[in-house]
């Protein structure tokens, strides 16, 4: 893991992990509120039982927060999960008009202030994802360069061997020509 990503991973991971832990075992009313808010933005959650939704959300946040804090999974996988999760939160904020100042104005009102942090989470997730992808591209480029260098070296050796054989054949031919004269 790169040192410049440690603060981002720890801060975001701790925030998300805490959020997930605080949702464990919520009462039915709180679960209904979470499920209703998510369903308003994402209709696929509409028919989900509220307590199951709350458990799914809690478990997802705990898993993502832990993955950010303890770097055991590939960084690209964690970064993609972080980006998807924060993107859904941002989408929920943007799709909930009661959190904005007015029609066409995405800035948060007093009720939306707590959700506006999702913009920052999404920016952090994109930064992490872009860094992971850049590093993966650089790693792939290094591997390709090494393969090409090995291939070129192999071609070089074969060419040198062929050249040496041709030179030997040339020397032998020259000797034969000298014997005949």
Image (cartoon, rainbow, N blue to C red):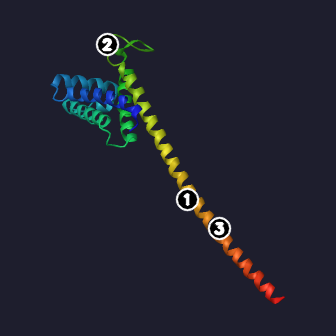
Please tell me whether mark 1 or mark 2 is closer to you in this view: 1
Q: Residue at x 27, y 32 (%)?
A: 61
Circles 3 and 1: CB atoms closer than 8 Å: no
Report the quarter where the N terminus lies. Answer: top left
Label 3: how many Cα within 10 Å (few below 14, some 14–19, many 20+) = few
Specify which label sits upstream in the sequence, 3 or 2: 2
Is the residue 172 above or below the residue 17 in the image?
Answer: below
Residue 160 — which label? 3
Specify which label sits upstream in the sequence, 1 or 2: 2
In screen coordinates, is 95 left or right of 176? left
Q: Which residue is mark 1?
A: 150
Is the residue 27 above or below the residue 174 in the image?
Answer: above
Residue reaching furthest bottom? 180
Residue reaching furthest right? 181
Please tell me whether mark 3 or mark 1 is closer to you in this view: 3
Identify the image quadrant of residue 12.
top left
Question: Between marks 1 and 2, how big is the CA–CA gap?
Answer: 61 Å
Question: Between marks 3 and 1, how big is the CA–CA gap?
Answer: 15 Å
The spot of residue 170 in percent (x, y) is 74, 77
The spot of residue 100 in percent (x, y) is 38, 14
Is the residue 171 above or below the residue 64 in the image?
Answer: below
Foreground residue among 128 and 10: 10
Identify the image quadrant of residue 153.
bottom right
Q: Helix or strand or loop: what does disc 1 sit on?
A: helix
The spot of residue 78 in percent (x, y) is 36, 38
Q: Which residue is mark 2?
A: 111
Specify which label sits upstream in the sequence, 3 or 1: 1
């Amino acid at each position: 893991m790169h040192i410049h990503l440690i603060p981002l991973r720890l801060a975001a991971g701790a925030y998300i992990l805490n959020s997930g832990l605080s949702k464990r075992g919520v009462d039915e009313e709180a679960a209904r509120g979470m499920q209703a808010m998510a369903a308003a933005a994402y209709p696929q959650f509409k028919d989900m039982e509220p307590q199951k939704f709350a458990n799914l959300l809690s478990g997802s946040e705990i898993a993502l927060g832990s993955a950010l804090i303890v770097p055991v999974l590939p960084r690209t996988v964690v970064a993609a999960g972080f980006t998807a999760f924060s993107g859904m939160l941002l989408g929920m904020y943007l799709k909930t008009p009661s959190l904005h100042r007015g029609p066409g104005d995405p800035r948060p009102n007093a009720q939306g202030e707590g959700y506006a942090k999702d913009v920052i989470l999404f920016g952090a997730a994109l930064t992490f994802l872009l860094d992971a992808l850049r590093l993966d591209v650089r790693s792939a480029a290094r591997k390709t360069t090494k393969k090409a260098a090995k291939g070129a070296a192999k071609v070089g050796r074969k060419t040198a061997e062929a050249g040496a054989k041709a030179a030997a054949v040339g020397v032998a031919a020259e000797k034969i020509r000298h014997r005949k004269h």
